Image (tube, helix red, strand yellow):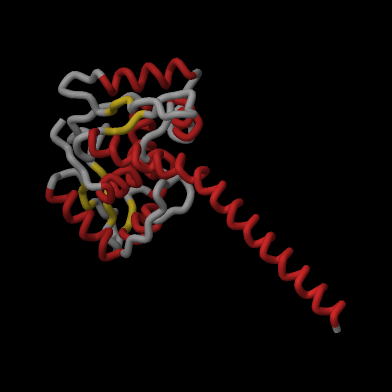
Amino acid sequence: MNIELSAHEARVLACLVEKQITTPEQYPLSLNAITNACNQKSNRDPVLELSEIEVQALIDSLSRRHLVLERSGFGSRVPKYQHRFCNTEFSVLQFTPQERAIVCELLLRGPQTPGELRSRAARMAEFTDAAQVEAALEALATREGGPLVQRLAREPGRRESRYAHLFSGPIEEMARSESARSTASLANPLLEPSALERLAALEHEVGKLREEVAQLRLKA
């Protein structure tokens, strides 16, 4: 696999793939539509706030690598763009509908479990059962020419391992980042005893002050 994307490039391409499937009547997309799709608050992780200038720069970068093509309709005053990432006559990557939906979701939301993928990718492809998700992930992980997804180590407290795409550099870097995030999340509960201790100390101080006020009132 020779495609390596930044996180924001991955978002632009995934939005084009997503909108091609879910709203074909509005595809190709204008710069404004792509920007809105990138900054969409649903079905995105993380939620971004990219400007049109930033998105245009990303489109230009992807266009130079022949991953995005300007394709404006007859009489259109606004440039519109379509992807050449997968499942086009120009694409090396040809996926089944299920594989394409899974790749798109991974590009939009980052690492996810098979269960999460089945639920979230259902808007772009039909999955008859969990086995079909597993089969699609296996095909992507063992693809001839190099894997496109990789299973991450199962995190404590999770029943399923998550899968990550391999379009944004070595998986070790992503795994370390995810591990650090998980460690920070797991560490939060350790802060709770300290907070409780501080609350107990405050309550103790308040109790002492009330006693002192009561004694002063008796003396008065």
User: Compared to 6, does 51 lie above or below?
Assistant: below
Image quarter of residue 32: bottom left
- The x and y percentages for residue 111 are 37, 35
Residue at 39% across, 45% down: 19
- In which quadrant of the rendered image does the C terminus lie? bottom right
Tally the marks. 0
Residue 20, x across and y down, in percent? 36, 42
Q: Nearer the viewer, residue 155 or 125?
A: 155
Q: Position of residue 58 (x, y in %)?
A: 22, 55
Taking the image as shown, residue 1 lies to the left or right of residue 164, namely: left
User: In the rendered view of the protein, which quadrant contains the N terminus?
Assistant: top left
The vertical placement of 148 against 219, above or below, is above
Relative to 72, does residue 189 appear above or below in the rendering? above
Q: Is residue 109 left or right of residue 196?
A: left
Viewer-nearest residue: 213 or 41 = 213
Determine which quarter of the picture holds residue 87. Answer: top left
Give me the residue at 33% from left, 28% from top. Answer: 152
Viewer-nearest residue: 157 or 191: 191
Q: Residue at x 35, y 26 (%)?
A: 153
> Residue at point 21% right, 43% down?
5
Q: Is 31 in front, or is 121?
A: 121
106 relative to 79, above or below: above
Spot occupied by residue 188 in the image (x, y as percentages of width and height) = 48, 46
Outermost residue on the bottom side: it is 220
